[in-house]
Amino acid sequence: MADHEDPKTGKKNKGTSKEVCGYPLSIFFIVVNEFCERFSYYGMRAVLVLYFKYFLRWDDDLATSIYHTFVALCYLTPILGAIVADSWLGKFKTIIYLSIVYAIGQVAMAVSAIHDITDTDRDGTPNNMTFHVVLSMVGLFLIALGTGGIKPCVAAFGGDQFGDHQERQRRTFFSVFYLCINGGSLLSTIITPILRAQNCGIYSKQKCYSLAFGVPAALMVVALVVFIVGSGMYYKAKPEGNIMGDVCKCIGFAISNRYKHRSKQYPSREHWMDWAEDKYDKLLIAQIKMVLKVLFLYIPLPMFWTLFDQKGSRWTLQATTMDGNFGAIVIQPDQMQTVNPILILTLVPIMDSVIYPLIKKCGLNFTPLKRMTVGMFLAALAFVCAAVVQIEIDVSRKHLTYFNLTQFVNGMNKPVNVSTSEVVFGQIEKFHYSNYSQIRNGRATFFLQSGQLSCAFSRDFGFGSSYTFFIPSTLSLGSNCQESITGAEDIKPNSVHMALQVPQYFFITAGEVMFSVTGLEFSYSQAPSNMKAVLQAGWLLTVAIGNFIVLIVAEVAKLPKQWTEYVLFASLLLCVCIIFSIMAYFYTYIDPTEIEAKFRRNVGDDDDDKNDKQRKLEMEMMKRDLDRSDDEHYKGKQTKM
Ligand SMILES: CC(C)C[C@H](NC(=O)[C@@H](N)Cc1ccccc1)C(=O)O
C-alpha cells in the first residue's frame, strides 16, 4: 500500500486502509494477532517447569535453569528479528515467516509431550526419553526464535499503520496492544494449567501436557491466519537495505576518522558522529544520532525489569509461606501472578481515560519520560511493600516456634507412650490426656507404643496452630494409625495472608503501566523510520539484561534475610530512578519524520539551481538542530524530559 507524503511537511498519510472511528481497520488484525500470540506464549510457559519436572523427570535445579535460559533467549532474539525486518524482509514478511517457525515450535512441544509415542511397554511412562528431550529442546529453540523475532516487529508494524496526523490514535493503539498482551496471557495462565490437569493417552492415561501445549500451538496458528487475513489492508514500509550493516560501518568510520584527526590542528566537530560526514550520507548520520540518543537513555532501564521479573520467582516463593485461603477459594502461590494481568486490564483504561487527562487538566505536562520515572519509583515502592510483608512473615515464624502446640487424648483402656524424634510426650494413662508439647512447624511423625501395639503416623503442622489428637479405643495390634487417629485443630495456623501481597502487586503493575506501556510507544515515536523495529528490539534487550541482573545480584549479594534483599533491590532502583530522571531532563523529544523530511528535501533540492553555499548553510543549521535538539517537539510543543 502506498503512502502519500505531504510535499511541504514531509509527513506521511499511510495508505488507504479503511478507518473506523479514526483508527485504521488494519490494526484490528494486529491486536487480535497479539492476543493469540501472547495466549500461546504465556500458556506454554505456565506449564513448562512442571513438564520438565514431571514429564521429563528433571530435578528442580535443571528445570529452573532451562526455564530461565529459555525466557532470556526470548528477549535476546528480538534483535535478530528486528535486523531481518528493517534490513531485509520488511516487518510483514518477517512476522509471517517467524510465526511459521513459532507455530512449528509449539507443535513440536505438543508432540514431545505425547508419552504414547515411545511408551512401548504401555506403562504410562515414555521409554525413549531422549526423543522427548530432543524434540522439546528443538521446539523451545524455535519458539524463542519465533516469539522473540516477531515481538519488535508486531509492535512497530502496528505503529506503522498510523499516519502522522494520527499521533493520539497511535498512543491509544499501544495501550490497547498492551491490554491484548495481558488479556491473552491472563486467559492462558488460567486455562493451560486446567488442561494439564486432565488425564489423556491412548494406552494409558497421564497428565495431559500434550493438550496444554497443543492449545497454545493452535492459538499460534490462529494468530498467523488472522495476520494473513488482514494482509490487503496493511501499510507495509519497504526495508531500506542492510541498514544495520550501514549503521555499524558508519559508526566505525566515525570513530576511526576521529582517531585519525585527533591532532589539535583539525577543528573539532559538534558531535563525534559528524566525523562520518566525509564518507556517509548526512541523513544516515542524523538517524544514527537519533538512535544513539535513545539507546543511551535505555542504559538504566534494565533495573526496572530486574525488579519486575521477580514476580514470577521471589514473590511466588514468598506466597508459598503465606495463607492462600480466601474463603470460597484457595489461591495457589503461582496463581497470585495472575493479579498482574488482571490489574493491567483495569489500570490501563483508568490511566488513559481518567488519570492522564486529569493530570493534563491540572496543567502538568506528564511527558513519557516523566511517566517512566514515576513507573520506576512505583516499582521500588512495590519492593518496599514486599519487604514489609516479608518481615511480617519472619516475625510470625519466630512466634510460631513457641506456640505450635500438640496434645493427645488416650481413649484406650490401657496406657500408651507417645513420642516424636524430638519430643517425648511420655506415658499417657488410660482415658487421660497429655500436656501440650511444642512441635516444630512442617511435617512431624509420632510413634505410639502400648504393649504389643506399635505404630506411627505423620501430620503437617501449619504455623502457630494447636492440635488435639484422639487415640481411639479400637486401636489394636495391626491397626493403621495414620487412618485411625483423628485430630482437631484447636487454634488455626496464623500464617500471614496472601492478600497482603496485593499492595506490592498493585504498585508493580501501576509502575508497569507507566513504564512499559509508555516505553513501548516512546521507542516507536523516537526511532527513525528505517529503525523502528531495531529500537523496539533495543527496548526488549533491556528486559533480557534485567533478567540477568536478577541472577547476578542474588548470587553476589547472598543476603541472609529475604527482606534485606527486597530493600536492596528497592534502593538500587531508586538510585537508578534518580539517574534516569537526570538523563531524561536533558533529553529533548524529536519528531524523526520531520527531521528526515528536511534532510530528504535538501537532497531533492540538489536538482534545483539553488545556491550551493545557502544549501550548505541550511544543512548545517539542521544538523545543529538535531544535536542541540532545538527544534524538537513533543505534541507540537518544545518539550524537555
Ligand atoms: C516484559 C514485556 C516487555 C511486557 C509484556 N508483559 C506483560 O504485559 C505482563 N504484564 C504479562 C504477564 C502475564 C502474566 C503473568 C505475568 C506477566 C509482554 O509479555 O509483552
Image (cartoon, helix red, strand yellow):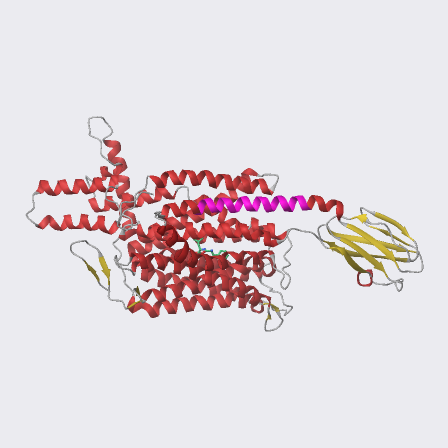
Residue 471: percent from left, percent from top: 86, 59
Q: Observer-nearest residue: 440 or 21?
A: 21
Does residue 34 appear anywhere in the picture? yes
Residue at image position (43%, 41%) is 577
On the image, which quarter does residue 433 sit in?
bottom right
Residue at image position (42%, 69%) is 222
Q: Residue furthest top?
A: 264
Q: Is residue 526 left or right of residue 608?
A: right
Residue 53: percent from left, percent from top: 60, 57
Does residue 546 appear anywhere in the picture? no
Tell me if residue 619 comes above or below residue 354 in the rendering.
Answer: above
Q: Is residue 249 left or right of residue 515?
A: left
Quadrant including the C terminus: top left
On the image, which quarter does residue 297 sit in?
top left
Residue at image position (46%, 62%) is 183
Q: Residue furthest left?
A: 609
Q: What predominant SS class does the magenta segment belong to?
A: helix
The stretch drawn in magenta includes residue 435: no
Q: Observer-nearest residue: 470 or 269?
A: 470
Quadrant including the N terminus: bottom left
Tell me if residue 480 comes above or below residue 244 in the rendering.
Answer: below
Residue 543: percent from left, percent from top: 44, 49
Q: Observer-nearest residue: 170 or 147?
A: 170
Residue 206: percent from left, percent from top: 61, 68
Q: Specify start and end residues of the magenta stretch as a single range.
A: 375-396
